[in-house]
């Protein structure tokens, strides 16, 4: 008589269920996990497999955050059996025994996730993502506009109580659940899965305009390989009669109608914005910028097409080079005549500004958009970490580096603005009127052009801008790639190169409107409306979903399983209350007083505000749409549907030594 092996399901820790007897392999498979026990084996004690033992790990079973199905590693002999669990006893690790071939087959089914080659690759990637062009142009401008040195007080407060806790939360979520921003919600709160889709759409909007700014920088870089930089002269074909070169002629008087050669180079040659009448008539596409953007996307493609193991090597250059250049520019700027005037203007505190709401709103918005939670990038990068990596330390280090970079960039910018003010015989406030990209491509470019060794400094400066932008583009697209590959592994799992190619092609086509003669108007519109309110809303819902629906205690137990310690009361209070209020504060301030859009001498029409809100809503609408779909497609009464929709669907595979454990 043929003997059939007895198959038993291994109950989860703390489960009261009796073992399930089955007769075939297919009967014992559930959610893609092998639940069969085909051979007798010996008990595996918990003590032999502990990782980072801590007092918390020796606590009562009530501290266990998940139930487990353990799968033996092929390195462990094919023996061991399930150990019984008594009520109130410490949880006991058990192993479902199987032969080496079966375990290898099972682990192949589960798939081994790619990890960073080195820890430093991850840190540089996160720093490169967080430190972007905004650190160079946005922080210095906001700082002097909001009280100089006094602005640092609300900035630090908002960073400590809002920005860094959100940064830490996303790193922990990504590292524990090891999924992108879409599929991770199956393990947290499926009802909020629309957040993942919204994040991907926002990332595509960012890629559609952010890389155009790098194309401008590349255009400047190409023209920088000349002994005389073209934006120092008024004798070019693109110059007008209003062009005034006060650097080469000290007797020239600067009047209201005067335009610097740097401004005309930027507006009339690079942007060619004089050929557009505004948003209603953008004009044709600039083929020069189109080629520059194509080259940027080619670099991006070959940097990320193979995954984090290749992009992790590229960031060794793109993340470190900007700091070398910033250091050189800081030394050069400090030696310029009039530099001290810029530094005083930058840091002189205006304490009365602290009594205004706008300063606190700007501080909160600046730290939020600088650290960058909510774009799916931190989730994606952290998902490639080793399970027991200290993401708490990583969050503190990278956040501190980001904030310090912003502060130092202010000195780099304002030493040069002080020099410009002295050369024009004006106050620094008159010179520092340019904001955003104009601060870099007009004011700073002009200052560099009139320094000794101007060609060298122009080359390294625009190279720095390109590398700053490339890091953020790598990260933003990796967030989308990881999300889609994790959500649709059977379709794109082995076709990453093809998917990356299609994604970059889509981004290039989406950026065509920003390559027109009026493309700068589109860049401004996208920057103000496509990302700001949508990202704030998404991260607000993310904080609510994790802290209130998934549960702050559950989340803290997850962190403890990874790091060996539980986050303290400060972090819990921030995640549960302060961070949601922090985000709601910024969002309400934005909606109550939308930014007045103006670029050069063009004032945006009223309908452009409606267009901007439509663009922002087009991404966020994914959240309520998915909620309606989820509730309508789930069987049962409305209460049952809601409960099922906020209950995690799948477990998280937790590597523990030589064992892969499935947290359910």
Image (tube, rainbow, N blue to C red):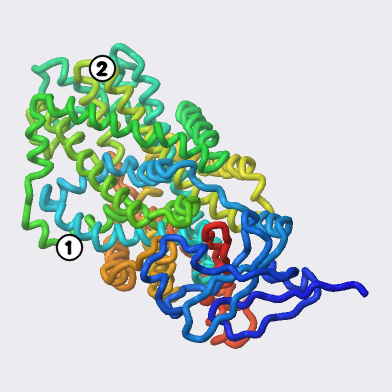
Q: Quadrant of residue 16?
A: bottom right
* Secondary structure state at the residue bearing disc 2: loop
Identified at 50% across, 76% down, the residue is: 91
Q: Position of residue 259 (x, y in %)?
A: 22, 28
Residue identified by numbered label 1: 357
Labels 1, 2: front one: 1
Identified at 69% across, 67% down, the residue is: 34
Name the residue nearer the viewer: 597 or 193.
193
The residues tagged by marks 1 and 2 sit, at their Cα atoms, a distance apart of: 44 Å
Residue identified by numbered label 2: 233
Q: Is residue 155 above or below residue 191?
A: above
| Quadrant location of the N terminus in the rendered image | bottom right
Q: Is residue 50 above or below residue 60?
A: above
**Label whose residue precedes the other's in the sequence (1 or 2):** 2
Q: Would you say 500 lies left or right of 152 here? A: right
Q: Position of residue 369 (x, y in %)?
A: 33, 52
């Amino acid at each position: 008589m043929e003997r059939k092996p007895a198959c038993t399901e291994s109950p989860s820790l703390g489960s009261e269920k009796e073992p399930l007897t089955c007769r075939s392999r297919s009967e014992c498979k559930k959610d893609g996990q092998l639940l069969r026990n085909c051979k007798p084996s010996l008990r595996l004690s918990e003590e032999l497999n502990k990782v980072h033992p801590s007092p918390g790990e020796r606590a009562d079973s009530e501290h266990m955050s998940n139930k487990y199905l353990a799968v033996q590693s092929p390195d462990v002999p094919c023996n061991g059996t399930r150990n019984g669990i008594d009520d109130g006893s410490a949880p006991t690790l058990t192993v479902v025994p199987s032969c080496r071939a079966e375990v290898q087959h099972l682990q192949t089914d589960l798939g081994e996730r790619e990890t960073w080659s080195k820890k430093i690759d991850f840190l540089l990637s996160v720093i490169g993502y967080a430190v972007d062009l905004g650190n160079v142009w946005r922080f210095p401008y906001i700082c002097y506009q909001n009280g100089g040195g006094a602005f640092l007080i609300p900035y630090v407060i908002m960073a400590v109580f809002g920005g860094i806790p959100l940064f830490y939360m996303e790193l922990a979520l990504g590292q524990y659940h090891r999924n992108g921003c879409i599929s991770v919600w199956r393990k947290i709160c499926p009802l909020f899965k629309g957040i993942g889709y919204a994040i991907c759409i926002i990332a595509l909007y960012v890629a559609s305009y952010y890389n155009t700014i790098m194309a401008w920088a590349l255009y400047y870089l190409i023209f920088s390989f000349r002994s005389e930089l073209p934006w120092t002269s008024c004798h070019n074909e693109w110059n007008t009669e209003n062009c005034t070169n006060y650097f080469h002629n000290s007797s020239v008087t600067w009047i209201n109608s005067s335009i610097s050669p740097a401004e005309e180079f930027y507006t009339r040659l690079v942007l060619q914005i004089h050929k557009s009448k505004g948003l209603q008539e953008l004009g044709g596409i600039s083929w020069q910028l189109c080629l520059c953007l194509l080259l940027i996307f080619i670099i991006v493609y070959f940097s990320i097409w193979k995954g984090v193991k290749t992009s992790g090597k590229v960031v060794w250059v793109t993340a470190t080079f900007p700091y070398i250049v910033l250091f050189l520019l800081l030394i050069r700027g400090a030696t310029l005549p009039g530099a001290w005037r810029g530094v005083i203007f930058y840091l002189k505190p205006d304490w009365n500004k602290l009594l205004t709401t706008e300063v606190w709103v700007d501080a909160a918005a600046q730290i939020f958009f600088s650290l960058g939670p909510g774009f799916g990038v931190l989730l994606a990068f952290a998902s490639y970490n080793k399970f027991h990596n200290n993401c708490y330390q990583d969050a503190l280090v990278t956040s501190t580096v980001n904030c310090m970079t912003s502060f130092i960039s202010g000195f780099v910018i304002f030493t040069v603005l002080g020099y410009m003010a002295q050369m024009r015989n004006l106050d620094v406030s008159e010179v520092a009127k340019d904001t955003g990209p104009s601060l870099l491509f007009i004011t700073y470019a002009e200052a560099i052009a009139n320094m000794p060794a101007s060609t060298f400094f122009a080359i390294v400066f625009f190279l720095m801008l390109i590398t700053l932008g490339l890091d953020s583009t790598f990260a933003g697209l990796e967030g989308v790639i990881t999300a889609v590959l994790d959500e649709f592994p059977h379709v794109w799992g082995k076709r990453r190169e093809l998917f990356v190619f299609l994604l970059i092609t889509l981004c290039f086509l989406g950026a065509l409107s920003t390559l027109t003669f009026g493309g700068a108007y589109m860049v401004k519109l996208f920057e103000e409306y496509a990302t700001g309110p949508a990202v704030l809303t998404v991260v607000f819902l993310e904080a609510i979903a994790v802290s209130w629906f998934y549960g702050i205690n559950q989340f803290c137990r997850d962190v403890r399983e990874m790091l060996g310690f539980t986050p303290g009361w400060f972090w819990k209070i921030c995640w549960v209350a302060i961070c949601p209020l922090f985000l709601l504060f910024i969002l309400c301030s934005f909606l109550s007083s939308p930014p007045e859009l103006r670029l050069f001498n063009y004032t945006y029409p009223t309908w452009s505000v409606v267009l901007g809100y439509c663009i922002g809503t087009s991404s966020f609408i994914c959240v309520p749409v998915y909620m309606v779909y989820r509730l309508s497609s789930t069987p049962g009464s409305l209460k049952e549907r809601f409960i099922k929709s906020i209950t995690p669907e799948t477990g998280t595979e937790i590597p523990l030594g030589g064992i892969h454990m499935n947290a359910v």
